[in-house]
Image (spheres, grey):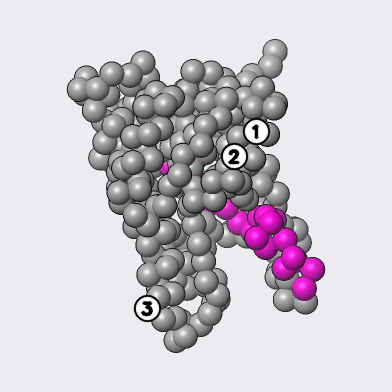
Amino acid sequence: MSYSIDLEGRVALVTGASSGLGAQFARTLAKAGACVVLAGRRIERLKDLRAEIEGSGGDAHVVELDVTDLASIKAAVAHAETEVGTLDILINNSGVSTTQRLTDVTENDYDYVMDTNTRGAFFVAQEVGKRMLARARGAAPGSFVGGRIVNIASMAGLRVLGQIGVYAMSKAAVIHMTRAMALEWGRHGINVNAICPGYIDTEINHHHWDTEQGRKLVDMLPRKRVGQPRDLDTALLMLCANESHFINGAVIQADDGFGV
């Protein structure tokens, strides 16, 4: 006897889908049967991913989104629902970082990180959440009452790391935001949870692991390895599953034991 998670008939919006974890999340949800809406600023990259997913038999659509612009958020969510129907799942993934000591952080550095990671994540979840709440209250049409919101935080939100202090602060806020949303929206069948990835090998940091500093960092890790984007697939699918109605407000560490 086998068990599988089937997301057939569900529509999932994935922010920051043009590369890295966002692209992997979109592939994973599409393989599980969901219709995925790929959102981000790099439209050509999103179109390439759409072609890849469709080539594998999946259903994907592209929408332009800048999470630092509230008008863009509203327009992207509205466009997605007009094109493919009501959103059942949100993967709130957009994120940026800078690397420097706290004494060297400029106002622009601070705003750059906070505007995307905290402010942007909040208003994306708010816009999608409003529509989920309207369906739950019978004020808007939709076949699936409730929803699944997965905020992508970071182990840095739980354990502060050197030279990425502002990033850590921004992701700590996302963790608390997750719990606040879970408390307020859970009664309406909207489950809000967070994944806190550890060090994951993506195209942005791939070159770093072969440097002296990168090798020193890997040697500090419990099992002296970095993860792959696919290592988050199981946690993602669990939190998005129709059967996960009893998981709400969870903050899942997916860091290979680094935070222990």
The residue that label 3 is drawn on is 107
List x then y, in percent, for residue 100. 53, 80
Location of the C terminus by quadrant is bottom right
Q: Secondary structure at mark 3?
A: helix
Residue at 44% over, 74% down = 109
Q: Secondary structure at mark 2?
A: helix
List x then y, in percent, for residue 146. 34, 26
Q: Nearer the viewer, residue 10 or 200?
A: 10
Residue 51: mark in rendering: 1
Which three-letter amino acid code belongs to the residue tagged 2? Lys
Crowding at dot 2, Cα within 10 Å, few <14 / some 14-19 / many 20+, comes out as some
- Relative to 114, 24 lies left or right: right
Residue at 40% over, 75% down = 108
Q: Secondary structure at mark 1?
A: helix
Q: Is residue 42 visible?
A: yes
Residues marked 1 and 2 touching at CB (< 8 Å): yes
Write the start and end of the magenta stretch as one range.
193-211
- Relative to 33, 10 lies left or right: left
Residue 117: quarter of image = bottom left
Which three-letter amino acid code belongs to the residue tagged 3? Glu
The residue that label 2 is drawn on is 47
Question: Which numbered mark, 1 or 3, is in the foreground of this view?
Answer: 1
Taking the view exactly as shown, the residue that stands out farthest to the front is 44
Q: How far apart are the two marked residues, 1 and 3, measured between alpha carbons?
A: 39 Å
Which three-letter amino acid code belongs to the residue tagged 1? Ala
